[in-house]
Structures are given as C-alpha cells and as structure tokens.
Amino acid sequence: MDQLRSVTADDLAASRDEFYAERANIVAKNAVSSAGIRAAARTPEGVAANAMNWDIEVTQGDRTNQERSGRCWMFASLNTFRFRTIKKFNLKTYEFSQAYPLFYDKLEKSNWFLENILDTLDEPLSGRLVSYLLVDPIGDGGQWDMFRALVKKYGVVPKEAMPETACSRNTHDMDKYLTRYLRGCALRLRRSHEAGVDTDELLEMKKQMMGDVYHLLVTCLGEPPASFDVRLRDKDEKVVLEGTFTPQEFFDVAVGMVLDDYVSLISAPTADKPFGHTYTVARLGNVVEAGGVHYLNLEPTRLKEAAIAQLSDDLPVWFGCDVDQSYLREEGIMDRAALDLDTLFGFPVEGCMDKAERLDYGESLMTHAMVLEGVKLDAEGRPTLWKVENSWGKDHGRDGFNTLSDPWFDEYVYQVVVDKKYLTDEERAVLETEEPTVLEPWDPMGSLAR
C-alpha cells in the first residue's frame, strides 16, 4: 500500500512526539479535556469588550422563549411587531401568539411541498431535486419573506387567544409524524401519476391530503381562532384597546406595519452572487400564492448602515446569522476576539477559510434569527458592538440579551430586514425592477433560520 495514502505507525509516532514536545499543547490538552473547547479558548479581554452600554437603543418588553422548537424567525418577527404595540399603547410588555403562525406555516408548507411534488412527477426519485424536496419538507425554520406571507394572509393574534401547547413548545414529534405522512403523500402522488391518473384527479387527491394535514395540526396545536376578544391595559391600568377582532383586523390595529415596505438585504460575497443584484431561491417558500423569497445582495457595510438608520428611528431590526460561530452561549457573546481557538490548537481552525469560502464549502450559512435593538459607535460614528434580543428566555445571556461585535457582523451576519426607505435610490431601483437570479434550492442563501 502507498505509504502516502494511509496513516502509518510512523506517522502516529511523529505526530505524538511533535505534540508532546510543546508545553502549550500539554496545557491545552489538560484544559480542553477538563473544561471543553470554548471554555479553554475563552479570552477574558475579548469578553470584557462586550460591556452593554449603547449609543442608540430601543427598549423592549419581557424576553420570549421558543423552547424546543425552531421558530426563531417567527419569534424575531413577532418581537419586532410587539415593539410597535408596546410603544403605541404604552404597555409594560406584550406577546403575540407564536403557536398561531406555527399552525399556518405547517399547513402552508405542506401545501407548498405537495405542489412541488406535483411539479416534479417526471423527475427521477433518486435525482438531487426530488431527494432534496423529501429531506425536510415542513421543518420549523423560515425567513422573513415567509413570515410576511403568513401575516398578510392570516394576521396575528394575542398569545392568550392561541396559547402554547406541548407540540408547539417541542415540535419534534409533530414534525416527525407530519413529515412521515407527507412523504407517504408524495409516494401516492408519484405512483398515481405513473399509473396514468390525470392532473385533475391528482389535485383532488392533494386536497384530501391537505384535509388530513389540517386534522393533524388541530390535534397538535388546537384550532386557530377566527375572532377573539381583546382588552389591553397600559402601564397605568387604563384600558387602551378593547373589542372583538379578526386576526387581520388585530394586525392592522395593534401593529399597523406596512409589511411590503420591509425588504431582505443579504451579504454573500461568493463569486456567483455579485453585490448590487437581486436573488431568489428556487422552490423556497411557504404560501404558494405569495411566491418565494427576494433578496438584494450588498456589502456588510450597507447592511449596517441601513440597520443603524432604522434603530435611530426607534425601530428594531430583524436579522439572520450563523449563531454558533465564535459564540459563548451562556454569556451571550458573539465575538471573534472572545474565543481564540487557533492559538489553543496551534494552527488555523477558525482562520482556515474566509467568508466566501465558508459559504462555498458548507462551513457556514444562516442558522438563527434574532433582533438588533442597540448599537455602540466609535468617535467616527462607526459601529463597534450590537445589542441583540434573542428568543431563548430571560435566563440566557444577560437577561435574554446577547452582544455581537462588529467584526463578527462582517463574518457571520447574512441577512437584515429593513424599511426600503433606508436604501439608496439606486438600490431601491435594482430591488424593484431587476429580475432576480434564481439560485439552486440547496444554495446556502436558501438556509432557514431555526
């Protein structure tokens, strides 16, 4: 056997001798094996730079908790909504139902999946496209454009109008059995097509399948309310809103946000996505009639400038990132300087790829959505540190808040949602008139925040 192609005893001996020849390696081994990698790599000076004092800040209600579900994108979106409600009615805190959009997202994703199955009946089952569609048809994750589609169609409701259930707090089993059923539906549709069943009959089969999906979701999450009573009291216990509302009416009264004014800016420096152009992702979405996602790709500096402009107008900012990178979870610190893994290991681990390379080679993509609620600026007005509201409860981080360093933003923030008024005239024109480039379904910009 070629000695250059296998791991030999001599190779192992050389590696061992090299490792134990350095005192630092022994210290690192003892520290990591006792405390874990991140604890051993934690840099106190980097942590100290994450003090929470802000030049621009919006104030929010009590922390929310997505528990054992992948609903961060919903929680982040509703946290930007409730900010407006709290401010409008002078409330101490407020919370919209997160189970309500979860119900309709599962319903719409099921329909979206079955429509994609009908559209790919002649594609090979073992081909990449159909295999991809079958992997995770109704997972919890999502993006802003998908949430906007849900709210435009179904509105919002107070938390007490559709409270959490065991299956919304922990979605694993509901997702498991709904996914199993939908894969069975895909099988039936494809086999019926092979047997010569016509399109109208297939569509009728799909309607019956969607009825079953509805039944499963009501069993797990309860029946979404068609209308409900509301009585809101402000900080002084004065009634400031009461009446009976539909979910759409309640959104208009309680939030009053022009959803179509809010657009998704991404920052992906890969060669196939030149900055200054628009993109969409094939077969990514939930509400069929609303279409898919729509992005404008810009340099990180422009995402920051737009976010700061919106924060300066006393409005929070939805954003998506790769949360686990250079992250001290318990302390709620996202900062490349707070973890020195490359020194710990003695060679580049974090530093072995740049942002574009990480995207191209599957090392990084958007995994989580949160809300920017503050920023610290240097003497020239440039951001140095960002305040982040997470949706993991008040016991996480610092009272439920995290910090995010500006260099971390450059590397691991992939998306912000802002009012399009904060774009330049040229950027708005591109966003509104350019035909977006269609990315493959498995492109990293099609990842879903969970």
Image (cartoon, grey):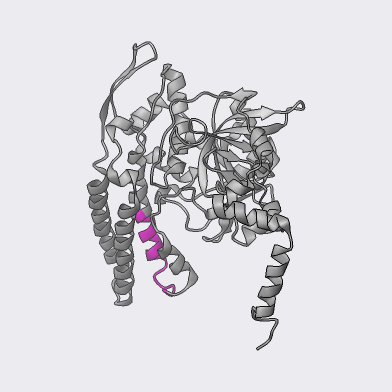
Q: Residue at x 63, y 39 (%)?
A: 428
Task: Out of 294 and 162, give the one closest to the viewer.
Answer: 162
From the viewer's perspective, tell me whether residue 393 is left or right of residue 401. left
Q: Quadrant of the N terminus?
A: bottom right
From the viewer's perspective, tell me whether residue 425 is left or right of residue 136. right
Residue reaching furthest right? 380
Picture mark count: 0
Task: Out of 68 and 9, give the one closest to the viewer.
Answer: 9
* Residue 274 is one of the magenta-drawn residues: no
Would you say the magenta stretch is mainly helix, strand or loop?
helix
Residue 103 drawn above or below residue 395: below
Splitting the image into 4 quarters, where does residue 409 fall?
Answer: top right
Q: Position of residue 29 (x, y in %)?
A: 62, 57
From the viewer's perspective, tell me whether residue 138 is left or right of residue 6. left
Residue 202 drawn above or below residue 191: above
Q: Residue at x 38, y 24 (%)?
A: 253
Q: Position of residue 277 (x, y in %)?
A: 66, 49
Q: Taking the image as drawn, is residue 18 in sight? A: yes
* Residue 118 is one of the magenta-drawn residues: yes
Q: Taking the image as drawn, is residue 445 in sight? A: no
Q: Position of residue 4 (x, y in %)?
A: 70, 81
Task: Out of 155 and 139, give the one closest to the viewer.
Answer: 139
Specify the segment rendered in magenta. 110-125
Q: Position of residue 324 (x, y in %)?
A: 55, 48
Residue reaching furthest bottom? 1
Residue 261 drawn above or below residue 213: above
